[in-house]
Image (spheres, helix red, strand yellow):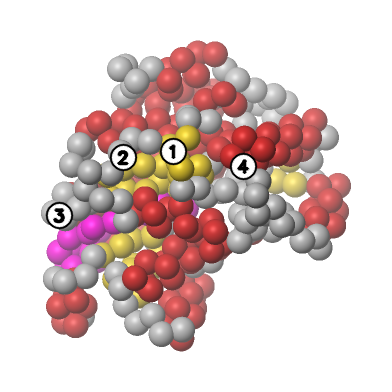
Amino acid sequence: MSETNTDSATKKLVVVTGSNKGIGLEICRQLATIGFIVVLTARDEKRGVEAVEKLKGSGLSHVVFHQLDVMDPASIASLADFIKTQFGKLDILVNNDGITGFVLNDEAKRVVKAVEGLNFTCPKINQNELFLLMQVEVCLAKQSELAIQTHETTNECVQTNYYGTKRVTEALLSLLQLSDSPRIVNVSSSLGQLQLVTDPWAKEVLSNEDGLTEERVDDVLNKFLKDFSQDSKGWPAYTISKAAINAYTRFLARKFPKFRINCVCPGYVKTDINYNTGIFTVEEGAAGPVKLALLPDDGPSGFFFFRKEVSTV
């Protein structure tokens, strides 16, 4: 690793979670193309190594793999130790790992199969139109009971999307503080915007900028998990987990004013997480997170972006 240590003295180091495929892999590709050293992570070591070899095969040599399971504290600690030992610091953390928190019934699978065969091209769709489209799709899925939340998938969604992201971030904060220009990018979703949080108390807590703390975010998630039932209409796990990430982003930005910390919805991108029903390519989806990773020192912090533009939470 002597060559890696030498490179790290002159090149910025990036960690991208959940990056063996989809948007995460494309973020790695775009940042490696710029010349950054990229640590590609994945739960499955075989898939992660294959992803790195794919990037190296296209001429991107400064990409390394490290196993990471955001649900496993030992795995997170191993990643932090690897970065400290081999690089000494970290410049950019892109928290991309996430899951939907639901399963599809047989009817939904048939619908998805049909949609996968279609070619959506909406080059001029604006933010409001896309957000409305996403709302309609989610409402239709819920009303038709196509997407089913179980206690298991709900808990896994909250633990992965929020607590997993939080654990990784906390483990790497000391290494980010050693950077001259630390950046944290949390890949979120428009479905986590506060207008979609239907519980009035939760919405009030997450929108209270002055009183927002990690403990208050925990209170919201604990209430969600306590109240959850399979017939619940007002507590979609994906929405509340991403709303929590958006709130955590704002909290961190205030706590670390020298950092640039933002969250971003990459758009409705055609990936496995939505069964390839998206309308944007992974290249288009990665553009927003990459932009935030490259913000100047006087750039915005504590904001929610829709693709490349500041939006509302």
Image vertical order of residue 249 relative to residue 266, above or below: above
What's the residue at 67%, 38% (across, down)?
A: 129
Q: Is residue 49 at least partly visible in the picture?
A: no
Q: Which amino acid lies under the numbered mark 2 shown in the image of this protein?
A: Pro
> What is the CA distance from the residue labelled 3 to the residue labelled 1?
24 Å
Q: Which of 166 and 299 is in front in this view?
A: 299
Is residue 93 part of the magenta span, yes or no? yes
Q: Are marks 4 and 2 in contact (CB under 8 Å)?
A: no
User: Helix, strand, or loop for circle 4?
Assistant: loop
170 relative position to 159: left or right: left
What's the residue at 69%, 24% (across, down)?
A: 233
Q: Which amino acid lies under the numbered mark 3 shown in the image of this protein?
A: Asp
Residue beneath label 4, please? 126
Residue beneath label 1, please? 310
Image vertical order of residue 34 relative to residue 219, above or below: below
Residue beneath label 2, please? 300
Image vertical order of residue 280 relative to residue 211, above or below: below
What's the residue at 37%, 66% (across, down)?
A: 31
Q: Is residue 233 at least partly visible in the picture?
A: yes
Q: Which of 43 and 185 is in front in this view?
A: 185
Mark 2 Cα-neighbour bin, 10 Å: few <14, some 14–19, many ≥20? some
> What is the CA distance from the residue labelled 1 to the residue labelled 4?
13 Å
> What is the CA distance from the residue labelled 4 to the residue labelled 2?
22 Å
Q: Are marks 2 and 1 in contact (CB under 8 Å)?
A: yes
Q: Which amino acid lies under the numbered mark 4 shown in the image of this protein?
A: Asn
Q: Position of residue 183 (x, y in %)?
A: 28, 50
Mark 4 or 2: in front is 4
User: Helix, strand, or loop for circle 2?
Assistant: loop
